[in-house]
Image: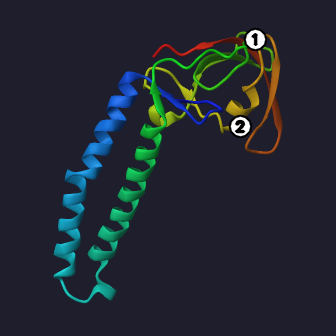
Amino acid sequence: MTQTSENVTWLTQEAYNQLKAELEYLSGPARTEIAAKIAAAREEGDLRENGGYHAAKEEQGKQELRVRQLTQLLENAKVGEAPASADGAVAPGMVVTIAFDGDEDDTLTFLLASREYASSDIETYSPQSPLGSGVIGNKVGDDAEYELPNGRKATVKILKAEPYSG
């Protein structure tokens, strides 16, 4: 998945199909299942002390939130490959290779995209992660700085950046 400034989300066909199937399941069979759980728990008696009822209601709330998220995501989705950055800068949807502290023997290659929609064949970093936000906008050959969880700064050199082909 790749987000662009126009609020369009680029998805591979595989990711689109997977999300569409999840939405159809959550909107149909899963809603029926959770309604049955709630009805069964309601019949157990006092709702104030009914753990099963409260758990089912909480599950229903999470499920409905996911339905709204998927609906919005799919409404703004375009299937295909995100357009390459016009100036060659690192952007979401790119496979990026970096070297830690300029050491070209200590490298990492990752997809800059949402982990939820990435395939399992490549490590994925969110554009909102410290590393992801640190490399966005930089070009091959640039040094990029990002903040580590302990508050220190780290520097990486961008060795390669190319659009993800899925």
Residue type pointed to by label 1: Val
Viewer-closest of 101 and 59? 59
State whether residue 35 is above or below residue 54. Answer: above
Left/right placement of residue 160 relative to residue 21 reads right
Task: Describe the element under mark 1 as helix, strand or loop.
Answer: loop
- Counting from the top left corner in percent of width and height, residue 87 is at 75, 13
Neighbourhood count class around disc 1 (C-alpha, 10 Å): few under 14, some 14–19, many 20 upward: some
Q: Give the x, y percent position of residue 77.
A: 47, 32
Residue occupying image coordinates x 42% and y 52%: 68
Quarter holding residue 100: top right
Name the one closer to the observer, 23 or 45. 23
Circle 2 packing at 10 Å, graded few (<14), some (14-19), many (20+), is some
Residue found at x 78% / y 20%:
138
Q: Kindly identify the residue that appears in the image at 73 percent across and 17 percent down.
A: 89
Helix or strand or loop: what does disc 2 sit on? helix
- Vertical comparison of 150 with 133: above or below: below
On the rendered image, what quadrant is the C terminus found in?
Answer: top left
Q: CA distance from mark 2 to mark 1?
A: 19 Å
Q: Position of residue 37 (x, y in %)?
A: 20, 68
Q: Which mark is residue 130?
A: 2
Q: How is the image coloured?
A: rainbow
Q: Position of residue 134 (x, y in %)?
A: 75, 31
